[in-house]
Image (tube, rainbow, N blue to C red):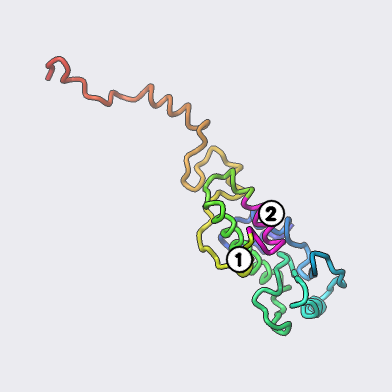
Amino acid sequence: MIDAALINECADPSLKPAIIEQFVTAAGSDDPLAVTVKSGGRLILVPKATSTEEAMAIMRQYAGQAIVRVGLTQLPAGVGVKEPADLKPDFVDPCQNLRKGTAMFAKVLRIVAKWYGNPTSKDVFPQIFDDAVYAWKTGEFEGVSVFQAEDPGIPIEAPQQSDQTRPAELVHGEEATPKDVQPETMQDVRHAGIRIDLSRIGGQQ
């Protein structure tokens, strides 16, 4: 599991720690030096890097020819890089990789959430998250290249992971579930005072 202190220090603040842990577990790696290379949908076996220099050498060898993923978040190394020489060691620095990877994943989440109509229901978020992870792994969502796509810039309103464990609390200002509200509502109705002024009926003043 990814270190909580690393998340607090380096990860994108728009994502809750529980979501970041889920993301790294589902799409990332425990090894900050991990380099994954795919070409034509097939995994290319590369030597396991044991140093930053070895990881950089593998990245530069395959960048531009294959899909190269790097580090804790398996960040796509080729995005925005025109020449292999442009690849920097911060790709395999745990903090920098987490910072860049979670920021990019947050953008992917916003793209997917926008496609769903930016729902606020906590029941929808797991599907949005799953689709975002799939988009992260494939680089596409509904025909859109998510890494190159423009950031919608819309905050993710759907409650994230940890909210689902607190059904009795209000989530992002939403009402509690109808099951929670109904007994109190019925009780309020029974004990409510008279709201219509009947004192003037029958000529009474």
Magenta-colored stretch includes residue 139: yes
User: Residue 61: horizontal and vertical position, in percent?
Assistant: 80, 80
Q: Tell me which residue sits at (61%, 42%) in the image.
A: 165
Q: Which mark is residue 11?
A: none
Which residues fall within the magenta stretch? 128-142
* Quadrant assignment, res 15: bottom right
| Residue at the front extreme, as displayed | 143
Where 2 falls versus 192 (above or below)?
below
Residue beneath label 2, please? 22
Q: Say if mark 2 contacts mark 1, CB within 8 Å.
A: no
Q: Secondary structure at mark 2?
A: helix
Q: Tell me which residue sits at (42%, 24%) in the image.
A: 187
- Count of picture labels: 2
* Quadrant assignment, res 203: top left
Q: Which is more N-terminal, label 1 or label 2?
A: 2
Q: Secondary structure at mark 1?
A: helix
Residue beneath label 1, please? 103
User: Residue 122: horizontal and vertical position, in percent?
Assistant: 57, 45
Work out whether residue 18 can be spotted.
no
